[in-house]
Image: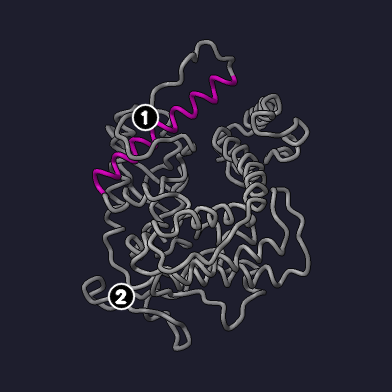
Amino acid sequence: MEKAPGVQQFEVWGDLNDWERFKFFGQLTEFEKQMAEIRFPASGSLYLLESMTESDTHVALDQETDPEGEFCIGPSCERGWHTAEALASASPRFDRGPWPDLSSYGTALVERELAILQNRTSDATFDSPRGTLDEQIDTLNMTKEVMSRLNDRTLNGKVSEPVLWHTDLHMGNIYVSGRDPPQISSIIDWQSIVVSPLFLQARFPKFLTVDKDYKLGTIKLPDPPPDLDKMDAKDRELAEYKFEQAKEAKVYEVSTAATNMRAWRCLLISSFLRELFTRCGEVSEEDEIPLRACLLLVVDLWDEIGFEGECPLNFSEEDVQRLEQQFEKYSNYHKVHEFARGILNADFEGWINPILDFAAKQQQNKELLEEFVRRSSEFGMTPEEMRRIWPYSER
């Protein structure tokens, strides 16, 4: 294995001007376009054909894509299919792929999560807001009804061609070299990257935080936050951070529209359709609350999405009110975690790059926590709740 040439993106990003960043996003979206143009026969993971045994389910690539006949699509290597709980819950019906269509992929996600949950003897203890075990299983069974009805006539089916996409593009996985502008020299960390439906793959890179107020579909750069000079230092820091992220996200979006129209159209698809799959695959680890919220929207837009027949789902007024309360609490919890990771440049476990001053980051973490404690009511929490859910309280 060769060492990746260049330096990691985060080492130079702070020194780049707007034009250099614009050129960087042009390179990135062109790279994504080239990957998305490769045609695959199914969703799963890419393997060398010679590595498959007789017992391995796989689908060979067609001759136009793979003239030498070297590759195939086999079972998914994505982490969710190989956790300790997933492996302990495996059974003959546990389908890890490859999946020939959207419905089979969605149904397999449901079956995996049901198998994991049904293997648990009781409700586990988690920090994040979540429903009961019975509620999680009930929500997944409703989701299975929806997944079984997906076909090429639904809105999802029209953008479900399997494509290869790097879904973990943070600044440590992208290497650049040179200046005027820097060139992307390599991208690393491909071991868990999969072939999956385009509308599930297309996304903003991980190093961009896209706020819920971000406006997709326009070419206008966001306006700077008003009254910056009247804000205190902490409020100004947060406002400037959100503005820079929104500006860079818009440059990425416009560049995607110019180079990769299919992917851009997928970004415009209602997020709940994408989240129907992503949230389904996270129930055993995260919870069923956001998945149930997706199902509410499916009910409201059943005909518009393109499903045939009557919608099999039904929610009472009481169900809706209770879910709204749960979802607000769930969303605020994760919003705090996203802000903390973004501002501190840390990952889920609190890792920061070794070249950064760790003591300074610890101090920044303490100051940021106190600022969020001060503003806890904006997130529907008490100061004590904010301290309890803070992701880096012991670091």
Residue 194 at what x, y percent from top left? Answer: 43, 64
Q: Position of residue 4 (x, y in %)?
A: 40, 51
- Where residue 45 sits: x, y (%)? 43, 69
Of the numbered discs 1 and 2, the one sitting upstream in the chain is 1
Q: Quadrant of residue 387?
A: top right
Residue 236 in magenta stretch: yes
Under circle 2, the secondary element is: loop
- Please identify the quadrant where the N terminus is shown: bottom left
Q: Residue at x 58, y 44 (%)?
A: 347
On screen, residue 184 above or below 315 = above
What is the span of residues highlighted in magenta in the rendered image? Answer: 234-260
Q: In this rendering, does residue 363 appear at all?
A: no
* Residue sitting nearer the eye, 144 or 39: 144
Q: Quadrant of residue 370?
A: top right
The kind of residue on which mark 1 rests is Leu
In the image, taking residue 74 as reference, residue 237 lies left or right, namely right
Residue 356: % across, % down = 56, 34
Give me the residue at 69% from left, 28% from top. 377
Near mark 2 (Cα within 10 A), the count class, few <14, some 14-19 or many ≥20, is many
Q: Relative to 172, say whether 52 is above or below.
A: below
Q: Nearer the viewer, residue 330 or 87?
A: 330
Q: Is residue 67 left or right of residue 70?
A: left
356 on left or right of 180: right
Q: Which residue is drawn at 38% across and 52% down?
A: 202
Q: Which amino acid does label 2 sit on?
A: Leu
Q: Distance between the residues labelled 1 and 2?
A: 41 Å
- Point 33% across, 73% down: residue: 41
Name the residue that disc number 1 marks.
16
The reply to whether the magenta stretch includes residue 115 is: no
Which residue is nearer to you in this view: 317 or 199? 317
The secondary structure that most of the magenta stretch takes on is helix
